[in-house]
Image (cartoon, rainbow, N blue to C red):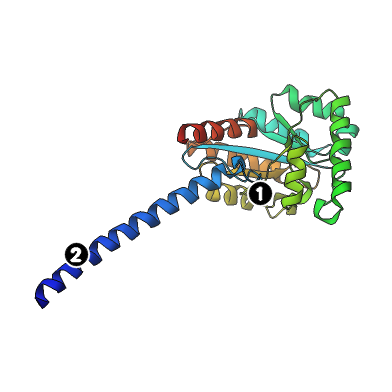
């Protein structure tokens, strides 16, 4: 009787282990997919930090808040390597450089905004943040860009209240998950290799086209062909959103 009980308990432990493994594996896969699709949760809006990990598409993005020189070198590199990116610019910068803004869009790059004045939103009252966003929208409308929906908050600072405010104004906050800190000018090879080594499926890369980023254009000449060699496909942020939405619907 005792021998039978020991055998039965062993079988029970084996099945319990298998069941726990299946539950943990399922939970992990759900969390991985949720990280890519979380921006589409119905109960609470969040920022997009990356796309679908199952897709080799990546999004190259640039921030511009001041300067009018380095952006031309960056545009030349993008043209040379036939890569399209998404540029996030402040309304204040757009007012000063409408010709450069036009060049960016003429070369088929996507446009998003950094609000109007490049000042952290978490350091301001919510009412002031709303005024900044609404004024930025007016500025871009006057410049002929009436459908600005992509928003990157200044310095990437935001909280739940700012996300909800942005959604109420028909904006989608776009963050990133790969940041080589090119604006610190750590070295051309450092910027390039850090990006090449860390980039994986669905990543959103943050670089800068302001004049402070003195080494970015040269780094692009190294990293873009290397990333292409790894079979990554460069897509716009809007394409990444559409791709992720489609995957979500297929799951549903």
Q: Which residue is mark 2?
A: 11
Rendered location of residue 153, percent (x, y)? 76, 46
Q: Evaluate whether residue 69 shows in this view.
A: yes
Rendered location of residue 108, percent (x, y)? 69, 24
> What is the count of numbered marks?
2
Residue at image location 82% in from the left, 41% down from the top: 115
For the residues bearing labels 1 and 2, Cβ distance under 8 angstroms: no
Q: Nearer the viewer, residue 92 or 216?
A: 92
Instruction: Tell me the SS state at disc 1.
Output: helix
Rendered location of residue 149, percent (x, y)? 73, 33
Around disc 2, counting alpha carbons within 10 Å, would you say few (fewer than 14), some (14 to 19), or many (20 or more)? few
Rendered location of residue 247, percent (x, y)? 50, 34
Mark closer to the chain start, 1 or 2: 2
From the viewer's perspective, is 210 left or right of 177?
A: right
Q: Which residue is mark 1?
A: 188
The nearer-to-camera label among 1 and 2 is 2
Q: Which quarter of the figure is the N terminus placed in?
A: bottom left
Residue at image location 60% in from the left, 34% down from the top: 241
Q: Nearer the viewer, residue 7 or 149?
A: 7
Residue at image location 47% in from the left, 32% down from the top: 250
Residue at image location 70% in from the left, 50% down from the top: 182
The quadrant holding residue 239 is top right
Q: Quick one: which residue is furthest to the bottom in this view?
A: 2
Instruction: Tell me the SS state at disc 2.
Output: helix
Q: CA distance from mark 1 to mark 2?
A: 59 Å
Q: Evaluate whether residue 209 shows in this view.
A: no
């Amino acid at each position: 009787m005792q021998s039978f009980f020991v055998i039965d308990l062993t079988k029970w432990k084996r099945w319990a282990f298998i069941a726990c493994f299946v539950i943990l594996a399922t939970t992990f896969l759900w969390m991985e997919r949720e990280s890519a699709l979380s921006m589409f949760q119905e109960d609470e809006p969040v920022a997009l930090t990356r796309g679908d990990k199952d897709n080799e598409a990546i999004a190259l993005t640039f921030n511009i808040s001041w300067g009018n020189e380095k952006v031309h070198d960056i545009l030349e590199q993008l043209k040379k390597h036939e890569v399209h990116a998404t540029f996030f610019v402040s309304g204040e910068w757009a007012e000063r450089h409408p010709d450069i803004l036009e060049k960016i869009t003429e070369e088929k790059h996507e446009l998003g905004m950094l609000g109007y004045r490049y000042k952290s939103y978490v350091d301001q009252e919510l009412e002031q943040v709303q005024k900044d966003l609404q004024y930025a929208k007016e500025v871009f409308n006057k410049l002929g860009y009436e459908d600005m929906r992509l928003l990157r908050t200044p310095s990437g600072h935001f909280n739940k209240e700012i996300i909800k405010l942005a959604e109420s104004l028909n904006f989608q906050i776009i963050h990133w998950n790969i940041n080589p800190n090119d604006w610190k000018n750590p070295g051309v090879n450092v910027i390039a290799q850090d990006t090449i080594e860390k980039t994986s499926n669905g990543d959103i890369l943050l670089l800068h086209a302001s004049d402070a980023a003195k080494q970015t254009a040269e780094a692009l000449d190294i990293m873009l062909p290397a990333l292409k060699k790894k079979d990554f496909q460069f897509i716009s942020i809007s394409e990444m959103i559409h791709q992720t939405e489609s995957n979500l619907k297929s799951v549903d």
